[in-house]
Amino acid sequence: MILSQPVLDAVSYWVAEMHIGNTLTLGLRMLVLLGTALLAFFFSDRKKDYFVLAGVLALFWAAHALVCRSVGYSDPIGDATNYIRTAQLPIYVLSLITLYRLAGSFPETIEKALTACLYLFGAITLLAVLTGTVNPTYPKWGIGICGWFALPNSQSAIYGILTLISVLHAVRIGSASRALLRCAVGFALMFTLGTRLAYFEIFAIATAVALSMFLTGKRNRRALAAVLALAVACAALYPFSPMYRNRKAYSVSADQQQDTADVTVEQTPPPPQAYDWLPDAQEPLDMLYRQYQPLMINRFGLERVKQAFGYTDDVQQLGDLRRCKILFCRLAMEELPFTSRLFGFELSTTVVEDGIFDVENDFHGIYFLYGVVGLALMIAYLGVFVLRTLRRILREPKRYLTLPVCAFGSSALISVINAYFSASVLRRPNASVYLSVALAALWLLTEKRSEDGGEEQA
């Protein structure tokens, strides 16, 4: 299941490039999910857990669907598909916990599979470079290397998880040379990807490796020196990095657009209540908003959009896609009843003509699509793993503060941080599957056991 993910991602990219549609790859991912869940259910001796999870997911979906229907359900099939993408996380976690228990050499097998995934991502990216078919991270300027993968932010989270786990596995088995090779591949993928998240992950991973060695007492000076040296090299090469070049190109473009806007709007007028007697004073600002936010204006009207942006004439704010999408969803939510705030609205609500305003960070996205209840459930679910792990470590540090716990725990944390800053983890099956792998491993590694090795109820 794990090793199929890089191949599925590459196939998904080429299917999209050839405009075939995502039915094939989406169907394959659903089959993998269904097959994994059914296999785990068959072998599980705790089938009640599966019924409870299914009940919670079904009840929430029923409430969400009823709310959407009450305001006009335009695309229930698409909305259901999107819900499955989010629900995949807890389904995979429960299934993998069962399957991990059956594994003969846990966590060694999982660590080796994730290391193989890292090398596979590296090989696919190298092949894309050699064949001149790279998907640039930032197509507008042709900057960054995203290989044959469609979502740079998802790749950032994936590379972070794989690199950290594979490097600490090499440290655990005492191989500095493997740690060097795995770290070099991972850091190279993140450095050339060019996103800010990926670049800063390099230093987060180096810090996590050093901290894990210190906390567990499993020190490998050669491996640590190799990881820190590679991180220092990435810092020294910052002026040549795709991330730096993209930020510079964006800054130059923003300055040029602001100069143009300043010519159009010589002086930003105050809010309308201060100049109701002089309506023509709004015209320059109106032109600016119609230029930068035509779809939002078509959907909500000029005055609501200007008010949402605070009547600014700063083109960096007007052109900030992340902010624009959040404001769009806030305006959409304001039009809906209180029940929509509890259980969210359907994904098609974010679509206007040929534009989609689905927000670019997962926690905001879960709130808008699944409401306060959905967001609370997700935060509570992730919080269970955090609190359980910390409790075990604080009570019995010698038993639970180990390199594998640090590896899977830190990688899960990196993934959640990526989810906070992007919309490419919790609602993206290609990335959430790795978070599922890490959370399931963390659960078993911190499972309370009796003296004879049997499992105790947590």
Image: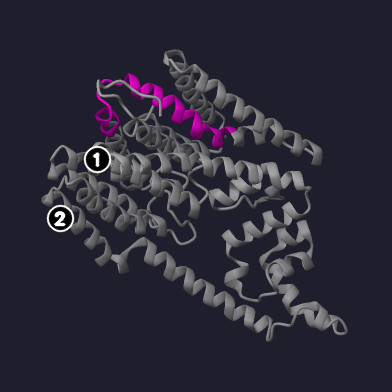
Residue range in magenta is: 84-112
User: Horizontally, is 166 left or right of 3 in the view?
Assistant: left
Q: Does residue 183 sit above or below 302 in this rendering?
A: above
x and y percent of residue 163 in the render?
Answer: 29, 45
Q: Residues within 10 Å of mark 1 (few under 14, many from 20)?
A: many
Q: Which secondary structure lies at badge 1?
A: loop
User: Horizontally, is 298 left or right of 53 in the view?
Assistant: right
- The residue beneath circle 1 is 402
Can residue 14 be seen in the rendering of this structure? no
Q: Does residue 51 sit above or below 410 in this rendering?
A: above
User: Horizontally, is 402 left or right of 318 in the view?
Assistant: left
Please state which of residues 112 and 391 is positioned toward the viewer in this rendering.
391
Q: Amino acid at mark 1?
A: Thr
Q: Amino acid at mark 2?
A: Ala
The residue positioned 53% from the left and 44% from the top of the image is 379
User: Horizontally, is 93 left or right of 234 in the view?
Assistant: right
